[in-house]
Amino acid sequence: MKQLFFTLFLFHFSISFSQKKCERIAFYNIENLFDTIDNPHKNDNEFLPTAKRNWNQKRYEKKLKDINQVLDSLKHPMILGLCEVENNKVLKDLIDVGSMKEHYEIVHFESLDQRGIDNAILYDKTKSKLLNSGKIRFDLLSPDSKTRDIVWGEFLIASDTIIVMVNHWPSRRGGQLKSEPKRLIAAYAAKNFIDSITQKRPDVEIIFMGDLNDHPENKAPKIISEKMRPMITKKSGKYGGSHNYRGEWGVLDHIMVSNNALKKEGFYVCKKSGTIYSPHFILTTYKENIVPKRMYGGLKYLGGYSDHLPVFINVAIAK
């Protein structure tokens, strides 16, 4: 009788498992994906062929191929948040040179960021349907008040509605404490959006991601993590972080999900699937420390991928 029960359990488990399809949702700060064309309305001068960085078409094309190598290695996430992209053109170029050019579509809005870097979402149109999209624009109340918008997209995946938010909060320039108020403004802008959505639609599933330029224990990320489940921690990766600063690894790149995204039906996020992705080819050694293989070190061209590592979660979808 026990053998029969065990056999029936295995049969039921195999049927249930076969009815779910595993996919991946990722975020990647791709470090200054600029084209070589001067935009007179933005301060993109450092990434021009005539600039000290000597940014040219050959290096641009290599950058596109390098990022696609990472996407291939990531097994082509069904939804991918990106930051540090200059415009819609570089996103189209990124897709066009890749192996998924027939699948990926773009969510992008031109922000007011003075350097001209934006956030964006790439999504696989064969696996998700874009229902709506928009941007969250906020003022930092300072002389350099123009910053990156939070970009969001609403997707229909299977029979569930998913909202994805992509963030790139203000940098730590001037030091963590001096710059923290700017990130708090960004955090409250994101929180207010989340609150406005969940009050009207408590069942909607939200995936929040981005380079927050803060660690999980800092004040600004905690404003979001008090409402959502953090998926990326020091234990999510081999080196304890997604970014290395002066030999120290830290988690700057985050993915958080609403609690109802962890349910076990329809579309759901797989628990404990948060991963800081660190294949060997996007790493290098600097001063005896393993670090991300970045594109530039100051003005010196290093020919790497990014100064950040990608992060991802796995999701399951009912067939």
Image: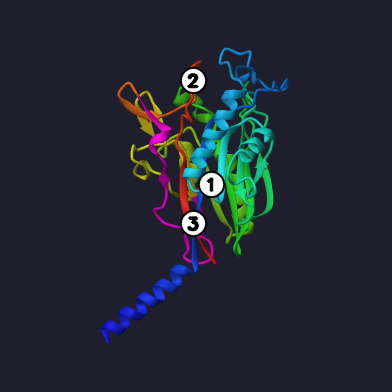
| Residue named by callout 1 | 208
The nearer-to-camera label among 3 and 2 is 3
Q: Secondary structure at mark 3?
A: strand
Q: Position of residue 174 (x, y in %)?
A: 49, 20
The nearer-to-camera label among 3 and 1 is 3
Q: Position of residue 118 (x, y in %)?
A: 62, 33
Q: Identify the image's colour scheme: rainbow, by chain, secondary structure or one colour.
A: rainbow
Q: Nearer the viewer, residue 281 or 173?
A: 281
Name the residue type under label 1. Phe
Q: Secondary structure at mark 2?
A: loop
Q: Position of residue 188 (x, y in %)?
A: 56, 40
Which quarter of the rendering shows the N terminus?
bottom left
Name the residue type under label 3. Val
How far is mark 3 from mark 2, CA to CA?
38 Å
Q: Secondary structure at mark 1?
A: strand
Task: Please indicate, yes or no, whether residue 32 appears anywhere in the rendered image.
Answer: no
Name the residue type under label 2. Gly
Residue at 49%, 43% (x, y): give it: 223
Task: Please indicate, yes or no, whether residue 270 appears anywhere in the rendered image.
Answer: yes
Magenta range is: 257-285
- Image height of 167 relative to 319, above or below: above
Q: Earlier in the sequence, mark 1 or mark 2?
A: 2
Q: Position of residue 187 (x, y in %)?
A: 54, 39
Horizontally, residue 116 falls left or right of residue 221, namely right
| Residue named by callout 3 | 315
How far is mark 1 from mark 2, CA to CA?
26 Å
Count of labels shown?
3
| Residue named by callout 2 | 174
